[in-house]
Structures are given as C-alpha cells and as structure tokens.
Image (tube, rainbow, N blue to C red):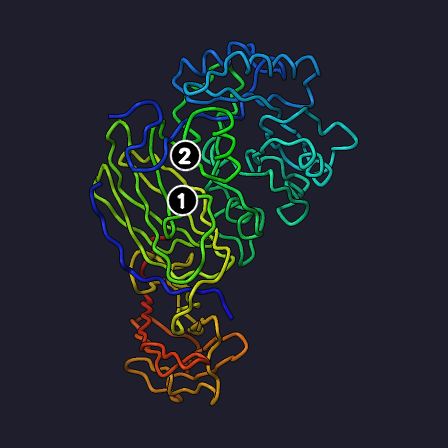
C-alpha cells in the first residue's frame, strides 16, 4: 500500500520574564550555542583557551571546539580538553571539546566529547565505514558537517546507504558557508525531496537539525545563527542527553524559541502513527514576529500556516501518519530568519480508521503543487493522467474488485471522456483522458463506495485539481 496520507486542514492560530534558558513557550529550558569550531590547534586563528572565553562573553550558553583530527596531536587534544574543563561552569556555561574527522572523499564529521580522537589519515579510520566502527567504540555524539561540500568522488557520507552509527545525531543545516538546508541533495530520483537532510531521513537515519559556526577566524560566537537545545539544565550531561535524543533545532536567529510536538511528543521523540495532533509553538526573546509555519512530512510540505507577525504563535494541525514516516517544521520570522526543528519519528502504526484517498499524480503538496497551502492541487502543466492512492492499514476490500463506479469527474463521462484502471496490489486508481492529456480547467474528482476489509466505509472524498498552463510562478519552499 502506498504512503500517501490524508491531511486534515484543521489548523488554527492562538496567542500563547526569563532567567538563563527559561522558556517562553512551556518547554524545558532552551539553551543556545554551537559545537563545531576551530582554533590554532588545527590551523585556525586563536588559542583554545581564548575560544571558550570569547564564546561565553558573546552570550553562548554552550560551546565546543572540534579541531581537525588530521592536524591534532595528542598534546593538542589534551590541551583542548583542559581548556574546555577549565571553562566549563555548570548551570551557566557548558564547554565541550572534540575533533572533526576530515575526509576529502567521505566528508567531514564533528565528534563531541569523545574519549580520544582519530584521523582520516589513519589507515584504520580512513573510510566512512571504518570511522563509523571507531565512533561506536570511542563514544561521543557526532554531526554530519556541511553536506555536499566534499562529494567530488560521489561518496560523501556514502550517501546515507552504507555504514551507519546511532552516534550520528544531527546534520548541519547552516554553517559559516551559509544556509545548507536548501542545497540540492545527492540524488535526483523520486525520493529526492528538499536536500541532504531529507535524503538522510528518508534512508532511515535518526538525525536532527544541527548547525554550527565552523569558526576559523577567532571570532567565536559573534554570528547570530545557533544550535538550540531543549534541556532541563545547562551542564555537559544534560546537553549531551538532549543531543543524543535529537531534542534540538537549528535557528538563524540568536534567541528564537521553538517547540514541535506530535501527540505531545517533543522533537527527537518517537510517536505512534494514526491520526496525530501536531503542535508548533514559537517565540522570540526579542519579541520578533513570525510570518509562516510549515510542516514537512517525508520531505513534502503538508501544511502551511500564514501568520501576520504573531509574536507567540501556536499552530495546530491533524495529520494521518504511518510507521516509518517523519515530521518536522520550519518557521519564518518577519525579518526572514528561519528555524528548522528536528523530526518526530513515527515508530509504529496506531489505531486505524476508514480508508483514505489522496492525489498521487499530480501529488498533493508535492513539488509541482503551486499552492500547497490550499486544499486543491494547482499545477501549470497538462496531465497525462490522474492517479489516486488508497491507503488503509488493514487493506482495501477488493471483493468485488473496485470498478469505474467508485470514481467520477464532475462534467465528464467515464468511458467516454476518460478511462478507469485499478491496481489492487498498489491500491492505486488511474484515470486517463480520452485525448492526450487533461488540459486547462478545474477537475473535481469524487471517490466513493470504498471500504476496508473490516467493513469500515470511507466517506465520499472530493479531490480537486486545477490546471492552468498560464501560471508562470514556480513553487517556492
């Protein structure tokens, strides 16, 4: 059975004195910092000791150095750790240390608070799979750095299909080189959604939305971009625990607060599928407003809520999900700053309801949908067919097999203006026009008379496609 899921447009906006980390949006404390930075220990500017001093003075709640392993010595690693230990001040400033595994073939990975360090120049850790094995042995949490930068051999992170370690907890969505979330991914097939982040998630990697300054010039903490951690307290263990469970998000604003929950489970958590309530809360400690909230499922935007500068928005949606899905959100502020949440992972199927019918071609909320916030699918190209995906955990009742009477297109006649075909194994209905294509116009497709094998009937469902080849504006994400 296909994975297209029904989205209920039940979205609403409501309006919802801070010590260090105290949340304005009802979550545990939120702390801001980043963990992938450099010093003179690997050819960058400034001493490690000064790095921690300057990062704290810049207002970061936590900070880490991750100097290049290929340039580190044992003495240099010990010096970095000693500088972090001296700077660490529980409840006020958490200081981390680590290294960056730096491979020109397989990419760069920052490892935070490991027992020791290694190098891509070491013959026992010069491949991605060898490094993953090392990581499993020597601990720490790790982030995939600036994806796409070192893919000249076509093997960066082995494109998420090779070796894997649960110690990889996140991916940089921003870096000193810019915003990485919007970069094209490694592949161009039908599974490629919005870039490297979604590609890794689609391959089953349990990673969150990271980001770091990757500072080389000795100006630690002077930028506005942050990794934000939702944690009960500010100390190494608590921050590390939050990182290990993807309870963090990536923000281009220095003090933007964000909560993304599915059935009460915060980002990084697992949740059961079925009919899920998704809640996004946001705020800014400088009282900046928000203009948009987007919810992404399996790489596709499935809901967009437009705001009017609300300073404490709460957006609620109901979605239907299945085991293996993931959801995350993106919020946008009035000045254009954005934040990206880590996902909530759907780890089991929940209680099933009646079957659902959704447009698969053209895909509702897909890359060709010019207005994903609207209930209808709007495209600017003619369509050689319409395809409808039926979804149900128990399975569709195909006895007797579904026939043309289950679908009608307003104003058109089945068998004359279009043909009906049903693939029972895939649960897919295909409607093909009598001519070469469905041309300009609005097509209201009604699906009716379908039940699952337990006898649960699907309510009559109307799916609408608008085709207007005169629309020239491309979809924007």
Mark 1 — residue? 266
Relative to the observer, which residue lies in front, 87 or 376? 87
At 44% across and 80% down in the image, what residue appears? Answer: 454
Find the residue positioned furthest to the right. Answer: 123
Say which quarter of the image contains residue 43: top right
Q: CA distance from mark 1 to mark 2?
A: 9 Å
Mark 2 neighbour density, 10 Å: few (under 14) some (14–19) many (20 or more): many
Going by the image, does 25 lie left or right of 60? Answer: left
Percent of width and height locating residue 37: 54, 22
Q: Earlier in the sequence, mark 1 or mark 2?
A: 2
Kindly identify the residue that appears in the image at 33 percent across and 63 percent down: 378
Q: Which residue is denoted by mark 2 in the rendering? A: 230
Q: Position of residue 409 (x, y in %)?
A: 33, 80
Q: Quadrant of residue 414?
A: bottom left
Residue 302's tag is none
385, 266: nearer the viewer: 266
The answer to the question of whether label 1 and label 2 lie on touching residues, with beta carbons closer than 8 A, is: yes
């Amino acid at each position: 059975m296909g994975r297209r899921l029904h989205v209920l447009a039940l979205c609403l906006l409501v309006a919802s004195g801070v010590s260090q980390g105290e949340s304005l949006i009802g979550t545990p404390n939120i702390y801001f910092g980043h963990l992938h930075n450099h010093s003179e220990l690997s050819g960058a500017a400034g001493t490690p000791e000064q790095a921690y001093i300057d990062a704290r003075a810049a207002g970061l709640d936590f900070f880490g150095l991750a100097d290049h392993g290929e340039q580190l010595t044992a003495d240099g690693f010990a010096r970095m750790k000693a500088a972090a230990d001296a700077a660490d001040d529980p409840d006020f400033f958490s200081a981390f240390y680590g290294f960056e595994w730096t491979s020109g073939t397989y990419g760069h990975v920052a490892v935070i608070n490991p027992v020791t360090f290694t190098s891509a120049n070491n013959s026992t850790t010069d491949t991605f799979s060898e490094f993953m094995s090392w990581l499993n042995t020597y601990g720490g949490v790790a982030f995939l750095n600036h994806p796409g930068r070192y893919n000249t051999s076509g093997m960066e992170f082995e494109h998420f299909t090779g070796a894997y370690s649960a110690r990889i907890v996140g991916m940089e969505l921003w870096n000193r080189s810019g915003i990485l979330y919007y970069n094209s991914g490694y592949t161009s097939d039908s599974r490629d959604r919005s870039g490297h982040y979604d590609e890794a998630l689609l391959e089953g990697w349990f990673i969150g939305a990271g980001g770091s300054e990757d500072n080389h010039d000795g100006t630690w903490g002077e930028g506005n971009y942050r990794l934000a951690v939702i944690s009960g307290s500010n100390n190494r263990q608590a921050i590390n625990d939050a990182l290990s469970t993807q309870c963090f998000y990536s923000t281009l604003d220095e003090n933007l607060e964000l909560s993304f929950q599915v059935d009460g489970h915060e980002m990084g958590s697992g949740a059961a599928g079925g009919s899920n309530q998704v809640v996004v809360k946001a705020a800014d400690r400088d009282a900046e407003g928000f203009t948009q909230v987007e919810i992404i499922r399996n790489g596709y935007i499935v809901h967009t809520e437009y705001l009017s500068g609300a300073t404490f928005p709460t957006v609620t949606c109901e979605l239907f999900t299945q085991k293996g899905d993931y959801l995350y959100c993106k919020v946008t502020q009035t000045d254009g700053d954005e934040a990206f949440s880590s996902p909530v992972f759907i780890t089991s199927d929940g209680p099933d309801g009646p079957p659902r019918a959704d447009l698969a071609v053209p895909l509702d909320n897909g890359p060709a949908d010019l207005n994903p916030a609207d209930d209808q699918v709007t495209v600017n190209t003619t369509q050689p067919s319409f395809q409808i995906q039926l979804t149900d955990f128990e399975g569709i009742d195909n006895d007797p097999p579904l026939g043309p009477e289950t679908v009608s297109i307003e104003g058109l006649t089945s068998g004359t203006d279009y043909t009906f075909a049903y693939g029972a194994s895939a649960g897919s209905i295909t409607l093909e026009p009598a001519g070469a294509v469905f041309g300009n116009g609005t097509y209201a497709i009604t699906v009716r008379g379908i039940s699952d094998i337990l006898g649960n009937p699907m309510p009559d469902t109307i799916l609408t496609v608008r085709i207007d080849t005169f629309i020239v504006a491309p979809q924007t994400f």
